[in-house]
């Protein structure tokens, strides 16, 4: 039974109480298959700071969200996912992203190994819009995790297959999916354990380097400053590792040295600086003018 608004409340407070009661009702409705779809849609529009704890700690909600994910698995192979199915499961994923982002629920989210349920979606290769939306939303959940810069997140992800999954998307995904996947790899590399993991074996390093190299070649034909920013940052971070730095000296794409991206980066001071630092680390001798920068100190 809904609580009656207090006569001492002003209209704004009464509105807030009404909205909060709606949220409680929708969370309860997630437990029932016949009301779940509408509840998913309405809750996915909400971004209250306390929504994540309410979702995670309410009875049966996590199971209901996982059920939505698992129900889609049969539509992956063969690829028969419809737009309606994709929209519905992506609403569930949006709520999981909320849980992944919140400091009170993130650790439990990882301990329950929820990200693993998303990996089948990241493994898909269909180019249809429903699948692309599904991959992008799944990447958003992982991106929300790494954005926190928490050690426990990187530690967890390195025990999973997230690196090869992201590299595959970086190789063949849409521009937006490539951007999020590259951001995830960047965040993993920026962590000391992540850099050590990727540079631990030649196979891991070469997989990353080859993928980044392909992306540079593609970006030289179809520039995207936002994606290039993450690619350059990945290269720069790799150059912090002694063995990787030596290897990059031999395999860094010419397009990063010969001014190919000078126009693309003309308004991006930070990426130009990263590129200059990268070339200095590798001692490749490109002039600042070649990457669109004024000489240092001028």
Image (cartoon, helix red, strand yellow):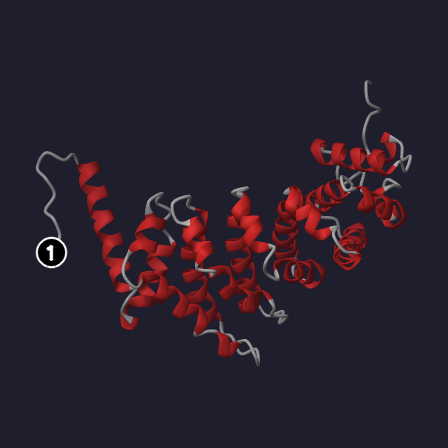
| Mark 1 Cα shell of 10 Å, populated few (<14), some (14-19), many (≥20) | few
- Residue 10 position, x and y percent, is 16, 34
Secondary structure type for disc 1: loop
Residue identifier under label 1: 1
- Position of 115 relative to 81 (above/below): above
Q: Is residue 28 left or right of residue 208?
A: left
- Residue 242 position, x and y percent, is 81, 41
Quadrant (top left, top right, bottom left, bottom right) of the N terminus: bottom left
Q: Residue furthest left?
A: 7
Residue nearer the viewer, 56 or 27: 56
Q: Is residue 42 left or right of residue 210?
A: left
- Residue 207 position, x and y percent, is 76, 58
Q: How many numbered markers are drawn?
A: 1
Q: Residue at x 27, y 53 (%)?
A: 23
Residue 96 occupies quadrant:
bottom left
Residue nearer the viewer, 100 or 201: 201
Q: Residue at x 54, y 63 (%)?
A: 133
Q: Is residue 121 left or right of residue 92?
A: right
Residue 111 occupies quadrant:
bottom left
Quadrant (top left, top right, bottom left, bottom right) of the C terminus: top right
């Amino acid at each position: 039974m809904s609580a009656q608004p207090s006569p001492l409340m002003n209209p704004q407070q009464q509105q807030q109480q009404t909205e909060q009661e709606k949220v409680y009702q929708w969370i309860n409705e997630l437990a029932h298959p016949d009301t779940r779809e509408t509840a998913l849609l309405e809750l996915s529009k909400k971004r209250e700071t306390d929504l994540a704890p309410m979702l995670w700690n309410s009875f049966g909600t996590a199971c209901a969200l996982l059920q939505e994910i698992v129900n889609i698995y049969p539509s992956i192979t063969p690829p028969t996912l419809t737009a309606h199915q994709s929209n519905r499961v992506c609403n569930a994923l949006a709520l999981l992203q909320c849980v992944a982002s919140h400091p009170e629920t993130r650790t439990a989210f990882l301990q329950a190994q929820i990200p693993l349920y998303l990996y089948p979606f990241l493994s898909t290769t269909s180019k249809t819009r429903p699948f692309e939306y599904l991959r992008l939303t799944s990447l958003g959940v992982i991106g929300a995790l790494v954005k926190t810069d928490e050690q426990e997140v990187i530690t967890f992800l390195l025990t999973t297959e997230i690196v090869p999954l992201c590299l595959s998307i970086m190789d063949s995904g849409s521009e937006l999916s490539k951007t999020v996947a590259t951001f995830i790899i960047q965040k993993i590399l920026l962590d000391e354990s992540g850099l050590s993991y990727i540079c631990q074996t030649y196979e891991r390093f070469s997989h990353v380097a080859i993928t980044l190299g392909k992306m540079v070649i593609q970006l030289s034909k179809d520039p995207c400053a936002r994606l290039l920013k993450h690619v350059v940052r990945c290269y720069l971070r790799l150059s912090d590792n002694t063995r990787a730095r030596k290897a990059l000296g031999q395999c860094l794409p010419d397009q990063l040295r010969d001014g190919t991206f000078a126009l693309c980066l003309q308004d991006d001071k930070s990426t130009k600086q990263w590129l200059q630092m990268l070339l200095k680390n590798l001692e490749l001798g490109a002039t600042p003018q070649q990457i669109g920068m004024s000489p240092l100190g001028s």
